[in-house]
Image (spheres, rainbow, N blue to C red):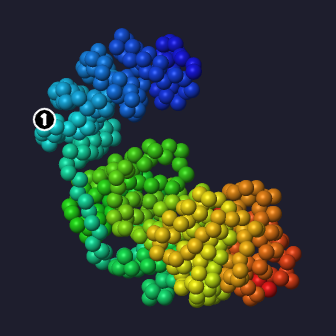
Amino acid sequence: MKRLTKDEIKFELGRPNGAEKLMDMNIDLNALYADAVELFKTEGLASSLLVRFTKKSSFIIHMLEDAELIAAIRATLRSENGKLRRNAARLMGALRLPEFVSDLTAALDHETQRYARPAMVLSLGSIGGYNAMEYLKHYHVAPSADESERKHFEEEQNALWTALRSSAPKVEHIFTGLAEEYALELRAPDLLTHQLESELDEMGVPCYDIRRSSLKVRTSDYAALFEARCFSEALFPIVSGIRLTPESAAEHAAPFMERLMRTAHTGDAPYRFRVELKIPVGNRADLIRRICMKLESAALANLPSDYEVELRIEGSMSSARLYCKLFTYNDSRFAYRAESIPASMDPSVAAAVLRFASEHLSVNARVLDPCCGSGTLLIERGLLSPCASLTGVDIAHKSIEIARRNTALSGVDAKYVVNDILRFECHRPYDELICNLPFGNRVGSHSYCERLYAGLLDKLSKLVRSGGIAILYTMEFTLLKRLIREREEKLTLLGQQRTEAGGLTPMIFIVRVG
């Protein structure tokens, strides 16, 4: 593997984002680390590169064993260069040696560059211990002298909150129920929203603002909504149509999130959050960082690795929609799906597909899934209404193993067979056949799908009784439609519907056999 010379390393470090680019090069990292350490010890260079190496635990061990490097880091914290002092503080925070606390507190007491202070504060929080936390408890962030200092003030304030919270015991907030009625937006599979509407209507929950992939309800009974199966997630709308800036996001979201968390949960603040930005934007990470800085307060803690609530941002920069999503409520509807395969159906899509075809399904039917995969569609069929039997067939042993495990967790009674459906024989035709057919661009190839689809349609009369129903779901809808049409004497197309799943636009076909 290629090794750079020290001059080449210095050249790369002099370029924008040089340390990051060096770590991404196809070069010998062990050699790069050794050269970076030597440059740091002898010339005071490569501190930013060493900070990058602290992301890898194996290199942290090397640093901790290098007494000369530790001494050089401590000396660099007293450098006349503010950026070097900042990087030295970051290294100390990553290495977490208790003896660094006195260095950092002394450095903070004399630090004149505001941009260097947040790293020192965060490092004290990372190291922890009585002396570090006592210092931070009494640490005061100096207010901004003018507008140019506002950014650094906010960074330092957020760093202090983060550092203090790092040593505080984590409060578990248990969802107790909504204290008042809220609007909620439920996300449904594309063009199958009316199936969710029908499901909620049966539950006595009125809907409004019904769109192609979402609808809204007003309720104070959050848990009751999760008796419905045809939606993937429930979001609390905060505001829509705003021009997105960190300030506007925080202005609308912070009070909403704080109130929702405070009134619907046990335990005191802070509440842990993350920001999910689903808007095309150039520097996405920077915008998320700036939004988080504005949101952070004594009540809201940015903790994307262990969050309880999410601020979701969709739409566009000029017309953004803000939502809140709870992660404190245990949505156990699809907990049976312990494992899946790459082409597995989303459970909410499976539930909606079956409800779309529900008028053609019958109670106590004998049901066959000829390409059952991880069992999702068959399980959802068993949960929709009582079935006399559920049988899954798949050519892949791994898929059948996963389907059996998932089915055991679901409480549904089904049996599975490892076989090629074109060779599978049944002693008695089934009432229903349901199938998430392999997609040409996901499993196999178009020519493989053509052979499979044609063979399956030709065998339907043996697999399904005369007058029985086949529900077929595929992205290869043009192919399947043609094959059905070629067999119109034996098969009748009763209905079809396009939808969307994972960026694809599959179609549902309802076919009567005989």
How many numbered marks appear? 1
What is the quadrant of residue 100 in the picture?
A: top left
Q: State the residue in front, 296 or 380.
A: 380
When the figure is inspected, residue 210 is found, relative to residue 422, above or below; the finding is: below
Determine the residue positioned at 50% across, 66% down.
406
| Residue 194 can be seen in this image | no
| Residue 396 can be seen in this image | yes
Location of residue 478 in the rendering, given as x and y in whole percent from the top left corner: 79, 68
What is the quadrant of residue 274 in the picture?
A: bottom left
When the figure is inspected, residue 246 is found, relative to residue 180, above or below; the finding is: above
Determine the residue positioned at 65% across, 76% down.
368
Mark 1: few, some, or many residues within 10 Å (few <14, many ≥20)? few
Determine the residue positioned at 76% across, 55% down.
445
When the figure is inspected, residue 77 is found, relative to residue 376, above or below; the finding is: above
Quarter of the image with the C terminus is: bottom right
Name the kind of residue labelled 1 in the image: Asn
When the figure is inspected, residue 46 is found, relative to residue 396, above or below; the finding is: above
Q: According to the image, label 1 marks what residue?
A: 131
| 189 relative to 445 in the view: left or right | left
